[in-house]
Image: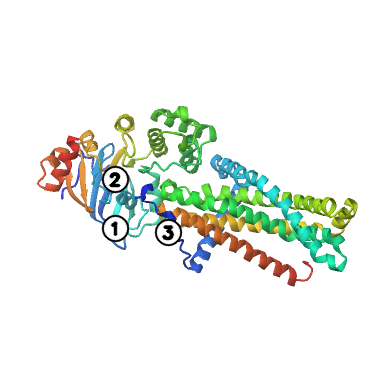
Amino acid sequence: MVADGSDSDAGDTPPSFGPVRGRFISRGRLAARSAYWLAALLAPRPLERPAPVTSGVVRELDLLGFGAIKLVAASALLVGLITVFQAAYQLAPYGAEVVSGRALAWFVAREIGPIVVAILVVARSAAAIAGEFASMSANGEIDALRVMGLDPVKYLVTPKLAALLIALPSLTAIAVALAVVGGWIGMSVVLGYNTNLYLEHLHESLALRDVGVGLAKSLLFAGIIGIVAADEGLRVDRRVASIGAAATRSVVYCLLGVLGADTAVNALVYFIPGLT
Amino acid sequence: MTTARAASEPNASVPPALEVRDLTGPAQSPVLRDVSLHVRHGGVHVVLAPMHSGKSLLLRLLLGLERAQRGTVSVDDATFDAANPDENDLRRVHRRVGVMFDSSALVSRLTLLENVELPLVEHTTVGGTAIHDVAAALLQDVGVVRDADRTPDELSRLDRRRAALARALALDPALVMIDEPGNGLDPHAATEFDETLRALHDRFAWGLLICTQEVRYAFRWPESVSVLVAGRIVEQGSLDQLLNSGHATVRRFVDRRGAA
């Protein structure tokens, strides 16, 4: 009893942001099942890695990862420039404009890189994931999988989650590198400082641990985006009108989840000695 | 209400392909009431119903996708309590059923071949090559093997219906359930699909349950027909019995659409 497309009133249906507790429970379950199937995907037994799942990971990696490279690259370059200009503007009254590069490297690797990439991926893919699952639900595809004894989490969610877990750290590494290039353009080409000085500051301020923290954050963000978007898409009823609302909720909850997790990680790193 | 039976009496020792008893549901606010159906192995039963009379819901209840208020569903030698389905019972029933939903419901991201391979990958232990061969043979049987590497979005509705039928047959089911076989097909394409369905049924002889609003299916498979109106089966028997039914709604429904 799927609603006919002509009956769709997706644009008129405000998304409902129902009880929070139910959502946490639902996402916890989905995360546990996804973790199980991800582990099975990495298991050595070939039957645990059916072709539709492995080819799904490749396909999703292409869509969610490679498809986002241009957007991430352009954004990271601009973010590097913006950060350097802002740092230089704030530091100029103290005559410390020259150390803007130091602030950039640390800040981009630990904070701006992972968060910007996560926000771009949310903007680009979270609504798409939720919308795809919601439309599959409306089209009876999810029911068909269940009737065939196929776990939708294994065949639909796991490939997307695996692709995000590979794509986000990779995109973050690219974003950090290009933000540093953007910072160099700002410092050397626009503000006129020596390139060697910029590289020296970069080398002094950027520790491997900063890059590690940034990449670890991006893994966490990938998990949040994958689980939240999939859960929003899978939990809708079988009406076409639900698709748009699921996509909207997915973006809202993914952004809140990413920012909330970033705050929690920053608090943890700040307050636990040895992690800073 | 008479229980529909095949033309020949079934062997008592062989369980029917489908036996439904007193199905009433969904649990919260029942739309269907006291539905009983019987499909013998190799038999065909057509459930005729006007729009919005609950035929898609019937299919969902039969598959345990919605919880019923009461009733039992048996497929071959597996049974589940529709009001309180046990996961293992449901799994055993699903393993014996092939389903074709009205929207075809192929996984849109996968190719036709991958769609048909899915149940084989999950439920068999044979290797990848054997699975590929079985899936390709099924696509050949339904006439879409040339499109095996294309996704459903690239195909006509008829080819999507054919591929969905191939997927429903992948696990050699005891029963095939089809919701609106001709959904979205023009008359020529619908006839082509019917011929494919009939040829495969004659060859493999699974039990077949067709839920539809198109009376022509009752004329095509006249041995056993139920008419579902407003959530109740108001008449059950052969097409001849329905044409001479004392129930005015049934007579009007069958006469008018059958003539068309």
Callout 1 and callout 2 share a chain? yes
Q: Nearer the viewer, residue A273 or B191?
A: B191
Q: Nearer the viewer, residue B87 or B138?
A: B138
Q: Tell me the element at label 1.
A: strand
> What's the residue at 34%, 58% (across, down)?
B67
Q: Nearer the viewer, residue A83 or B86?
A: A83
Q: Which residue is mark 1?
A: B25
Horizontal side of residue A232 vs B35, given as left or right: right
Residue A202 percent across, percent down from the top left: 84, 56
Q: CA gap, disc 3 to disc 2? A: 41 Å
Callout 3 and callout 2 share a chain? no
Quadrant of the drawing holding the C terminus of chain A: bottom right
Q: Which residue is mark 2?
A: B18
> In which chain is the residue bearing label 1?
B
Q: CA gap, disc 1 to disc 3? A: 28 Å
Q: Nearer the viewer, residue A199 or A51?
A: A199
Residue A42 percent across, percent down from the top left: 63, 47
Q: Amino acid at mark 3?
A: Thr
